[in-house]
Image (cartoon, grey):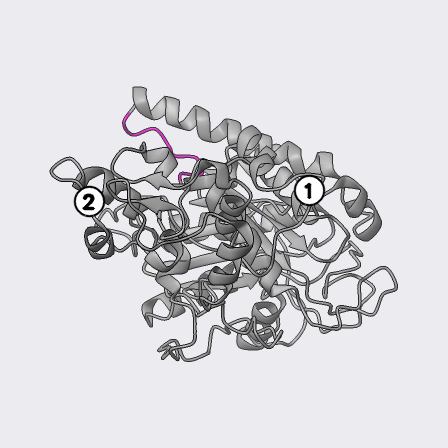
Amino acid sequence: MQYMMTGKMTTMEKLGILADSAKYDVACTSSGVNRKGDGKGIGNSIAAGICHSFSADGRCISLLKVLFTNECIYDCKYCINRKSNDVVRASFTPEELCELTMQFYRRNYIEGLFLSSGILYSPTFTMELIYQTLYKLRHDYHFQGYIHVKAIPGADPMLIQQVGLLADRMSINLELPTAESLKRLAPNKHRKNILTPMRQIQTGIIESKNELTLYKHAPKFVPAGQSTQMIVGATQESDYQIMSVAQSLYDKFSLKRVFYSAFVNVNEDKELPALPGGPPLLREHRLYQADWLLRFYGFRSEELLSEQKPNFNILLDPKCDWALRHLELFPIEVNKADYQMILRIPGIGVKSAMKIVQARRSKNLNFDDLKKLGIVLKRALYFITCNGRMMYNTKIDENYITRNLLNVKERLPFDVGDGSYKQISLFDDMNFQAPHTMIDTKAALTGQL
């Protein structure tokens, strides 16, 4: 199937339109794949992810992040590219997108490609164009760098299979947390059409791994796994409902990541909330913190929230909030508690917990030792003992500890404080000089909660 591009736009004019159209899709981090170049092609992808930079709010900015087209046959109420909007439309050809990717790569602007798309004519037609683009990149241009591509729900399963053999990561946006919300705001999209290719990709990943155990050179299918994205704040779901959906997706589809995108109101529509305070970025931040607890700290969504307590406390991170509601478990003796329990102590991250377990094999740890290991004692001191003693004469009382924790100023992500929203452009200066009040990106990503 060939697609003929019409119109007089230059490739760079299209890039300006289609890069801007892609800025609300946050599901574009890169990690989890190790593929060295063979010496003949261009680029490679390393296990810790490509060599990417992050903006101060943690968003990846090193991929060429564009839509193939912002034409769309759907009329989702929250989308800037919905068919009823009067916006300038543009579409790449596969050849144009390949040339752009290679030009930016050679100039060292990017290390890979993140490709999504509106729906041009039909899901299958659009997926065919995406397949042509990836095939040309891999085989004609010999590009061996990282590629993350969005699968189009409703497309021919054979095309999804073919694209999965060319991409490193694939993702399918869940869009909204519940089928009811999807029906109200995105009437052309159906939950079954979204979950069906998600299951296909999961099955393909499992089968590919099994084949690789038998045949060393078997083709890899989506080696970096799959992810999804949910819009937060466009509909009335509670944090409990959102985290329950995320937990179910991790359990049933083995997703690598669930991304949470604070709703940005770009359309005039009576079905959409007004959001006088701007996008709910602080809520998004708390959901990401809770998601980290699910993936790396052994928590379950039902431990963090319930129908009786359906939303996170915006003043405290989710682990502190959980600990304050379970003070009967504290204080914990760090020289005796097992690793999983140490992980649940506020102020102790995954790496710090491992250091504690290793260090106490040779000695009984005291508070000076914990400080040297990188423990955030200003949080942890209310919940731990060393050799049977607390750091200070501290009451194990929810109100008392809460007041003291609130006096510890938590640094929040960029722009959360003023409610504004900014997505880094491909052409922005990447040499960030973050002021001292801005969150330390590494801490945000490694989850020292």
SS for callout 2 = loop
Which percent across, then down, holds residue 246?
Answer: 59, 40
Left or right: 311, with 182 as reference point: left
Query: Where is mark 1, residue-wise?
Result: 241
Disc 2 or disc 1, which is closer to the eye?
A: 2
| Residue at the (52%, 47%) spot, across then down | 324
Residue 394 in sight here: yes
Q: Kindly identify which numbered label has been placed on residue 365.
A: 2
> Is residue 242 a member of the stretch shown in magenta?
no
Residue at the spot x=32%, y=70% of the render?
Answer: 108
> Could you say which is closer to the camera, residue 21 or residue 246?
246
- Magenta stretch: includes residue 222: yes
> Which sits in the foreground, 303 or 274?
303
Q: Which label is found at residue 443?
A: none
The residues colored magenta run 216-223
Inspect the image, locate mark 2, and give the three-letter code of the amino acid beneath it. Leu
Instruction: State whether residue 47 appears in this view.
Output: no
